[in-house]
Every structure is written in C-alpha cells, then in structure tokens.
Amino acid sequence: MPDQILKQGPSARRKSPAATPRPAGRPKEIGTATDASATLAARSPITRRFKVILAFALVYVFWGSTYLGIRVAVERIPPILLAGVRFTVAGWLLLAFCGLTGRRVAVNRRQFAQLAFLGFILLGVSNAMLAWSELYVPTGLAALVVAVVPIWFLLVERFILPTGDRVTAWGVGGVALGALGVAVLLWPKVSAGETLGWMQLVACAGLLASSFCWAFGSVLSRRWKVRVDPLVASGWQMACAGGIDLIAGLVLGDEHRATWDATSLTAVLYLVVFGSWVGYSAYIWLLRHVPTAKVATYAYVNPVVAVFLGWLFLGESIDRYILAGAAIIVPAVALVTRSEDPGDDAAPVTEAG
C-alpha cells in the first residue's frame, strides 16, 4: 500500500500554473497528474489508518469470541478432527475465492513449503492444542493463559530468532510479572490435588505450548516475508494445516466419536467464517503492515471478550484467581509490548506480491 508522496523536481516547482498557455477552445482540465498525486497522498494515510483500525477490531472481537466457539465445538467433535475440518474447509474455499477474484493462487515450491510449515505451526499445532485444552479449562482461563503470547514474542525474537536488539528493563519486568500472573492462575489447579485439577494443569501447560507455537510461527512468518498475496497466503496455510490435522484425526478414529448436529455445525461454521476467514486474514495483514509489538496487543482484549462470553453463554464462574491473574498478566503484556514498540515511525513489513 504505497504511502509515498510524489516529489516534484526544481523545474516543475518554478513553473506557475499559467506558464503554459491552454489551447483555444480546449476545456480546462480538472484533476491533472499532479493534482491526483497530491489527492492520493492526502487520502492515503487516512485510508491506511482506517484499514489498520478495522483489522485490529476484527482480531480483537472475533478472536475473543472463538474461544466460546471452540468450547462448544469440542464438546461434540474431537479437537484434532475439529481443526482438520475447520481449516480444510476454510482454506480451500478461501483459495477458490481468491481465484475467482483474480488473485494469483499458484505458488512455487519454496513458497508452498514455507506456507505449509507456517500453517502447520500456527494452526495445525497451536490451534489444535488450544482446542484440546478447552476440554478441561474454562474459556476465560484459556484466553488468559494464551494472553502471555507477547512474552513469547519477546523471548523468541531475542533468543531463538534473534534480531540483535537488547532486552530492556521493561521487557524483563514484563516477563517476570507475566510468570507471576500465570502462577496465580494455575495455583488452584496445583493445590487441588485431584485428577481434574491435574488435568486442568496439564491443559494449561498445553495452552502455554500453544501460545509459544503461535508466537514462533508469527515471528517466522514476519521474518520470511513470503511474497504472496495475504489472502492467498492465509488460504494455503489453512489448507495445509487442515489437511495434516484431518489425516491425523482420521488415523486416530476421531470420526467415530464426533457428533454432527445443528450445534456442532453452527460452531464449526462460525469458526470457519469469523475465526479463520475474518480474524486470521486480518491478523496476517496486520503482521505485514504493523510492528509485531502492536499486533500482539490483541492479547489485551481477547481475554476480556472470552471471559465475558463464557460467563454470559456458558455460566462460567469468575473467581478471585482469574481476576487476580488478569490484573497481573495484562500489565505484564503491556510492559513487554512497550519494551518492543519501536514507535509509530518504525517501518513495518510491506505487503508483497
């Protein structure tokens, strides 16, 4: 999305509008190239800002609601099969839409391998693990644990895929505070000393692993800069991740344990449309246009949406540990994001292709 202003040369600046006479009988032209460029330059920042705001709104609201959709779906469909069906349908239909709208869907071998790997990490592993964890933990708790993903962003970008930037005091404080918040959330599960409590603890560990995979895949996606249209990239990632999970689910015999009724189909449809098509595509677009730390701020809002919807529709309780954990984790995420935020003038990854 070009935001550059076309510059005029010195000779062009010296000429006045009346320097070149207009031929007799010729109507005055309105909207010359210079005028069009100036208009585009004036409107472009506003248009880009609106797109960024809209993309953030879609990620904030719809991704927060997908925790409820996943919880409803996994009560009837095993998690791996759910991920397989969801992303296979979403991916291939999105690719068909891209083809019908004139986008180039074909990719070369290198691009396909990169998109397949990113899809497997971001969706095939991370999302399937999240779905499994929601069998044992409430949606609000799941969203709060996953909210530590910006902390994983910092650790991945500093130590696993280093950029050479040093870790600031804000970052160290945020990581420490985030660890404390997670400990507060998990304490009731550790102290329960019963089977359900331990399974919830294992599920929370799975949520931490899920958020790590998400952060790793996101940073890798930003680092590789695959030169493919964002919607096409999303489609291939979903199709590849869905195919892998679908095969895995069929091998495990998940189809025999699935219940396909109106409720499960509605939940899957909601996840396909609003979680995969709308939310994920907006997220991929933001990764290419906005600094990573700003994109990670969705972790502030998603837990609030998830906790509210879990309470409203599923009757999930909000105890003092969830409130205390939220009061610690959200500031921790803010500290980490502040430590990584390079400012508004930082150059984002531009859309390729």
Image (cartoon, rainbow, N blue to C red):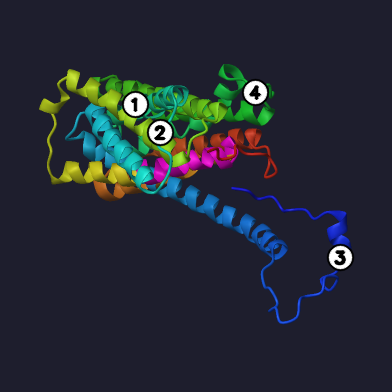
In this picture, which residue range is highlighted in magenta? 276-293
Amino acid under label 3? Lys
3D distance between C-alphas at marks 3 and 1 = 61 Å
For the residues carrying marks 2 and 1, which lies nearer the camera in this image? 2
What residue did someone put label 4 on? 163
At 49% from the left edge and 48% from the top edge, which residue is drawn?
A: 56
Instruction: Identify the residue at image location x=28%, y=38%.
Output: 70
The residue tagged with tag 1: helix, strand or loop?
helix
Amino acid on which disc 2 is placed = Ala
Q: Which residue is mark 3?
A: 15
Q: Classify mark 4: residues with Cα within 10 Å, few (<14), some (14-19) or many (20+).
A: few
Identified at 34% across, 42% down, the residue is: 94
From the viewer's perspective, is 121 left or right of 29?
left
Q: Earlier in the sequence, mark 2 or mark 1?
A: 2
Q: State the count of labels.
A: 4
Describe residue 174's horizontal placement relative to residue 324 as left or right.
Answer: right
- N-term-proximal mark, 3 vs 1: 3
Of label 2 and label 3, which has the lower sequence position? 3
User: As rendered, which of 38 and 139 lies closer to the eye?
Assistant: 38
Q: Position of residue 133 (x, y in %)?
A: 30, 28
Q: Secondary structure at mark 2?
A: loop
| Residue 307, placed above or below residue 15 | above
Q: Inspect the magenta stretch and tell me whether residue 282 lies in it.
A: yes
Label 1 belongs to which residue?
124
Task: Give the mark toward the camera: 4 or 2.
Answer: 2
Question: CA gap, disc 2 to disc 3?
Answer: 48 Å
